[in-house]
Amino acid sequence: MKRCIKYIVSVLSLLISLGINCQNLVINGSFELWENDTPSGIIITSDSPDYYKRRTRIYPAPLWDDSIPKFFPKRGFDGISYVGLHSTVATVESIAIPLSQQLEKNQNYIVRFAAQRLNLPSYSYSKAIEITLSDTILFDEPTGNGGFSSLDVKKFRSRVKNPLQTEIVRHKYGWDIFEVKYLAKGNEKYLIIYPPLPDSHEIIYYYLFDDFKVERDFNSTHLIEFEQGEHKFSNDQLQDVIGWMKQLPQNIDSIVIRGYADKIGAQEDNLDLSKRRTKNTKAKISSYLGDIDLVEYSFGEISYSGDLEIHHNRIVETKAYNSDKLESYDTISLEVITILYKAFYEDQRLRSIEKSDSINDKEIARIDSNNKLLLDKLFNEYGYLGVSLLNSEMQDYMGVMTLHQDLDFQLKHIAKIEEAVDNYECSPYIFAYLLDKIKVAQKEPQIFGSQLYFSEDDNRFKPYPISRKDNVNKKRKEYGLGNLEDYIKSFNQNK
């Protein structure tokens, strides 16, 4: 009877605690809603800030060089639109974005946004960006709910009270994700964003911004660690999970459970172990969740690439979502992820063996043929499966396997891989290697010098002919490759 009462009290306290409201309070923080060629809800007080859709500037600029747009990202962090802000010692551009409701006094909030420096030599880089939450717009009040302004830095500094110093917490899609926690003073209703403030005439900043969020602070992710080979869920682990669930906000309606295992033993056994960990976790916590849905995935040996630091892969991650914000990662079925993982494992298994009679060329050809059918189906159904649909470990799997296919297949899908690189879904070196392989197969000079042949006369590896060899190291650097000389040297040292 006591256990029953204790259980009921635990469930009631959990459900009551889920009444905390949590949502993004920033109105149109991603700039995807537009009205009269400006982001909705933002009223212009100067023409200085720049608005972009797919790197295209919305209004013309007299000094705009046709070569400059290539330095801008093709997409925003979470859509097609973003904003550019500029600062010098003399002036600073800033954005005031309205919040959907005032902040509550003494409540903890978390502010997140995506930013990146315009990658031109004349602009400086900073690892920290200030933001301000304010009950006023800080500059001349416009006629609408928010505003843009360009002020001189001295005046701007005098108006900004208690700025918050944000820090980079991770890097995704080519953008830096900045974050800061904030204890509200009460009644704040504007988020003020501006680039770093220079302290000398030699420093100029131009930053691109996107995806602003102000939310009540809570831990969306919880990790459960297991001993080697273990899948059972202890009472202490259960209490930790219940404690985590108690602080979840009202609008959470799904929890995704992801299970993993170390690479010790057979791959199939480790996948089964991760499934048992996932199912056992789901069974233990399901009775505490009310109407919240549980979604489970098991990834076996695939490395965890979530938000939290881990010391081994023997874990289950529980992560809370609002259903309309579930990551696209969760829309790819476990079956597809597992098939791709196994296909890549087969692709690499024989190629990783040092050259010897044990390598069976016919077996490699058979594996490549099977993978060709799989890749073609995946490209046609999903496009390129990169980091946002899988994870950082698997983002290059389709690209690497495409490198091992025939010329016709590579020509058919190279545009999809180039687009994936442009959208930060795939490592740039994949496209560089693929383009060189195609060029060499078509008897044309390669671009990056990645394709080598062994010269019997010189007893060394040498590159196939290269177009503009004087510029090759600059091109290689753009795609994340080292100097050509060091690349060739590494092959000849290991021949």
Image: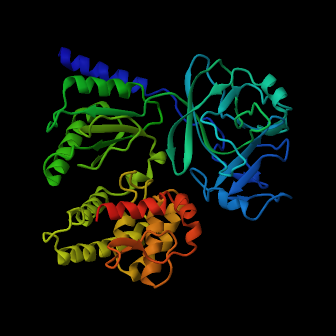
Residue with the most extreme top position: 2
202 lies left or right of 465:
right
- Quarter that holds the C terminus: bottom left
Residue with the most extreme front position: 458
Placement of 111 over or under 351, stated as above or below: above
Placement of 413 over or under 222, stated as above or below: below
- Residue 269 in view in this figure: yes
- Quarter that holds the N terminus: top left
Q: Where is residue 447 shown, x and y percent of the image?
A: 52, 72
Tally the marks.
0
| Residue at position x 34%, y 68% in the image | 401
Asked whether 404 or 472 is in front, the reply is 472
Placement of 370 over or under 111, stated as above or below: below
| Residue at position x 42%, y 55% in the image | 389
- What's the coloring here? rainbow
Q: Where is residue 291 shown, x and y percent of the image?
A: 36, 37
| Residue at position x 57%, y 50% in the image | 77
Residue 55 found in image quarter: bottom right
Q: Where is residue 438 shown, x and y percent of the image?
A: 45, 78
65 lies left or right of 373:
right
Residue with the most extreme bottom position: 443
- Residue 54 in view in this figure: no
Asked whether 353 or 377 is in front, the reply is 353
Residue 227 found in image quarter: top left
Residue 474 found in image quarter: bottom right
| Residue at position x 36%, y 55% in the image | 394
